[in-house]
Every structure is written in structure tokens, then in C-alpha cells.
Image (cartoon, grey):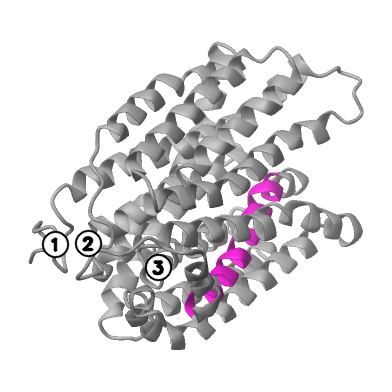
Amino acid sequence: MLDWRGENRASADRGIPGAGVALTLLILINLFNYIDRQVLAAVEPEIRRELLAPDDPNAQGKMGLLATAFLVSYMAAAPLFGWLAERYSRWLLIGVGVALWSLASGASGLAAAFATLLVTRCLVGVGEGAYGPVAPTLLSDFYPLEIRGRVMAWFYMAIPFGGALGYVLGGYIAARLNWRWAFYAVVAPGLLLALWAMLMRDPPRGGTDLATPPRRAEWRDYLLLFDTPSYLLNTLGMTAMTFAIGALAFWMPAYLVHQRVGPLFGMGPVMLFGAITALAGLFGTLAGGIAGDALRRRFRGAYFLVSALGILISGPSLLAFLGTPFPAAWIFVFLTVFFLFFNTGPTNAILANVTHPAIRASGFALNILVIHALGDAISPPIVGAIADRWGLPIGFVAVSAFMGLGGMFWLWGARHLDRDTQLAPLRLRSGQ
């Protein structure tokens, strides 16, 4: 089947020519993306000892600002690069972004003062803002909607696996050299991946969705995002999910230490939690993408239903974890993380499928802004405030309530998904 340029269009079970190479490259970039994010957490104690005064009463608060600075710059940059991606070469933008965050990470290792490190982490966020909203749109143009769930799952499996790998590698390198080399180590691979991205060729925009090339979006076209129920409800559900992930990632180590959880299989509780998160997140992400695509032919709104099912199992699993003694409690940790990541492929496929190709990058960018601003940017202090008053277990009960809320949003969205998917390729061209 040919597109408007006379090129092969994607079949229902595979992408257009070059799709496999593009997916491999984007997975590798995303892996280093999350390795780079978690390197900071792995070496935070060493940085604090070297760059801050030992009697600084605000030392931990300042270190927390490094994560906040990254997140704020990432959220702020994403909409700009989403808009640019609809007008310029997406591979070039990705290459520039990867090069920027790689060099900024290396500069983090050179920092001689805390203020310098704060600036470099902001630049890392800007670089990742050039990548986050753009990469999924490329995958959407390489692969048809019939298999986007599993394709997105393969891409996003780097979140749990890369994050855990970054923590392990950062700690390993810091222990044998020093914390600065943990940042230097990502520079060369990042620059090589950036060069590879710059040599890639953009696929036809909308080539797997449209019969004719899309026109450039106008400002009024972006209002369609707010008139698409599936997009709005999916973003709300993802916000609740991101709230839960942010709170659990931040507070679970403290909970394990407070409970005096003993080692298992030769690993301390925090390291074991990281290993379980990596495995459960990896397999949960892949399983959810496969399940969403498999059920899509049988159930309308399957992507929403699979996502809702996963998070509605994850919430009770978290509650069961709180009431189960160790080491049996680790089973419920695995189930909580597995089903919490079950939605990753389906929900990102929804974002791609219900947005017109001309505004798809901005749709992903707006989603990034909302889910982080109202999700993991605020959940650690909110759950911490609850823990200060009633204890951390009650904070986790509140987290499970947010999981249930996310499930409700996704169940609500299921009735709209089929219609919104069918309308997405038409609305800009018809002016509806």
C-alpha cells in the first residue's frame, strides 16, 4: 500500500521500512534518558558532602531542588519543542536535545559549586524536553494504530529498567572512582546516539493515519485537544498514575528503612526494591502493551480498559503490601509495580491515536506538562505532609486512592475511544 509520496505504508502487523531501526534507536536513547535521570539520585550523598557545608540546615532541601529544577525545565521546554516538531525535522530536534542533555550531564560532573550544578540540571531538563514529546510522534508515523500499544510499550520499558540501571551504575561508578565520573560516563554514548539521530530521515507525517498530507496546524486547531474526551480523560488518568509513581519512588525507601526490613537474597531492602521495580516495571509495561493490542480487535476502548484494570489491581496490591509481614510483602510490591506500569503502552497509544498528526507532538507535550505538574512534582511533599501527621502507611493509603481515581477516569474514557480514534485523522482537514 502506498502513501501520498508513493512510499510503502505500514501494514497492520509491521511498520513502514526503517521502522525497526527507528524503534531501536529511540529505545536506546530513552534508556540513556532514564539512566541519566537516576544517576543524580544515586550519587546525591556524595554531592551533598562535597558541594554543601556540613552544618547547612537546608542541605537536603537544596539537593531536592536539583530534581525540581530538572522537572520544571523539562515541563516548560516540552510545549515549545512539541510546537517545533510539527514544523521542522523531528530527528534533528531529537539529536540536538540528546546532545544538549549529554553535554549538560558532563558539565554536571565539572560543577565546582552547587549553583553551577543547579544550572546544568536545568539544561538537562531542556534537552530532554526536546525529546520527550517528539519521539512518540515518530513511532506513530512508523507504525499503524493496530500495533501502537506494544510499540509504545517497548519504547517506554526504558522508564523502569533505565531508571534502575542508572541508580546501580551511578552508585557503582561513584564507589570506584567518584561521583563526577558517574556524570561523565553518559556523555560519549549520548553524543553517539545524537549523531545517529541526526543522520536519520523523518517518515511522512501522518503516513500511517492519513491518505493525504496534513496541512500545518493553526492556533485554533490546538483547541481540538480540549474537545477530545479520550485525550482529556487519559491525561487525567495518567496524572493520577504519575502522582502515585512519584510518591512511591520517593517514599518507599524511607518506609522500608523505618520498618527495619532485613536483607533478602543478599540484598538490602532499598536495593531489592530497585531490582523488583526494574523487573516488574519492565514486564508490566510489555505485558500491558501486548494485552492492549490483543484485545483491541474484540473490545472498543480496550486500551482504556486494560489501563484501568491494571491500576485498579495495583491499588489494592499496595494496601495488601501494608498489611503483610516481610518477606511475603515483597510479592505485593512486585504486583503493585507490575500493574502500575501495565498502562504505559496503551495510554501513550491513546494519545497518539486520538490526536491529528499535525498537532500530535503538541498533544504529547501538553500531556507531559500536566501529568508532571499535577503528578510527581507535588506528590512527594503531599504524601510527606500526610505522613508527618498520620504516618507513612496512611500516606500510601492516599496514594492507593489516587490509583483508584485514575482507574475511574480510564473506565470513563473507554466509551469515547472508538469515536475519537476515528475522528482524529479527519478533524483538521474537515474543519470540524
Relative image position of residue 120 (x, y in whole percent)? 63, 26
Q: CA distance from mark 3 to mark 2?
A: 21 Å
**Mark 2 Cα-neighbour bin, 10 Å: few <14, some 14–19, many ≥20:** many
Q: Nearer the viewer, mark 1 or mark 3?
A: 1
Relative image position of residue 353 (x, y in whole percent)? 36, 70
Task: Report the front residue among 369 and 424.
Answer: 424
Work out which quarter of the rendered image holds the C terminus and state it.
bottom left
Q: Are marks 1 and 2 in contact (CB under 8 Å)?
A: yes
At 54% from the left edge and 13% from the top edge, which residue is drawn? 176
Relative image position of residue 61 (x, y in whole percent)? 82, 36
Asked where in the image residue 428 lies, by quadrant, the reply is bottom left
Task: Report the front residue among 252 and 406.
Answer: 406
At 23% from the left edge and 51% from the top edge, which residue is drawn? 203
Give whichever of discs 3 and 2 has the lower sequence position. 2
Magenta residue check for 188: no
Q: Which three-letter amino acid code belongs to the residue tagged 3?
A: Pro
The residue carrying mark 1 is 9
